[in-house]
Image (spheres, rainbow, N blue to C red):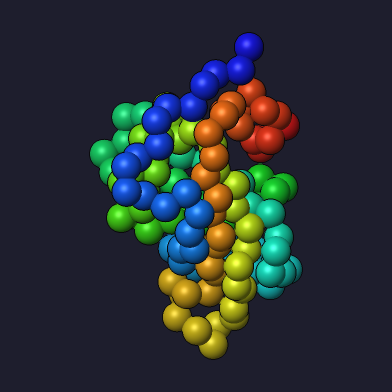
Amino acid sequence: MPRTAPTYPDGRPRSFRATVHGTVFADRQRHLDRMRRGDPLILIPDPPGQTEPEVWVHLASGEPVGHLPPEISLWLWPWLVAGGTAQGRASAVHGAEVPSWRRLVVQVDCRSGVSHEDAGTGPEG
């Protein structure tokens, strides 16, 4: 049975663009070479219990490419963990010619409804 998403955080946009941080660590930059604008991305919150939980950005195939900035994760993470859902798409993809924190820009669209596990749109679905 689908879960109902929690109330969306007041004053926060349901659709926004954000830079993806951490793309140069753990050899994640190799994924940027094959990414294109418009590619679907999966947003996955850290599990509960983290000191400073983040929202991770994964390719549709499941590989992590980085995480959203901390100031976004601060309000988006609790909503996602409580059952909210968000979809991402690559809005801009750049190479080494730009600073690492600007190499990938994601378009995030948040919606109410079922969680990614229930909808079958998570990494396993």
Query: Which x, y percent locates residue 29?
Result: 58, 68
Image quadrant containing the C terminus: top right
- Image vertical order of residue 122 relative to residue 1, above or below: below
Numbered circles on residues, count? 0
Residue occupying image coordinates x 72% and y 47%: 61
Residue occupying image coordinates x 62% and y 63%: 90
Query: Which x, y percent locates residue 1?
Result: 63, 12
Query: Which x, y percent locates residue 26?
Result: 51, 59
View extreme (left): residue? 51
- Image vertical order of residue 89 relative to residue 48, above or below: below
Residue 64 in view, yes or no: no
- Residue 119 quadrant: top right
Residue 102 in view, yes or no: yes
Left or right: 83 with respect to 124? Answer: left
Residue occupying image coordinates x 53% and y 74%: 103
- Residue 69 quadrant: bottom left
- Image vertical order of residue 56 relative to residue 125, above or below: below
Residue occupying image coordinates x 45% and y 35%: 80
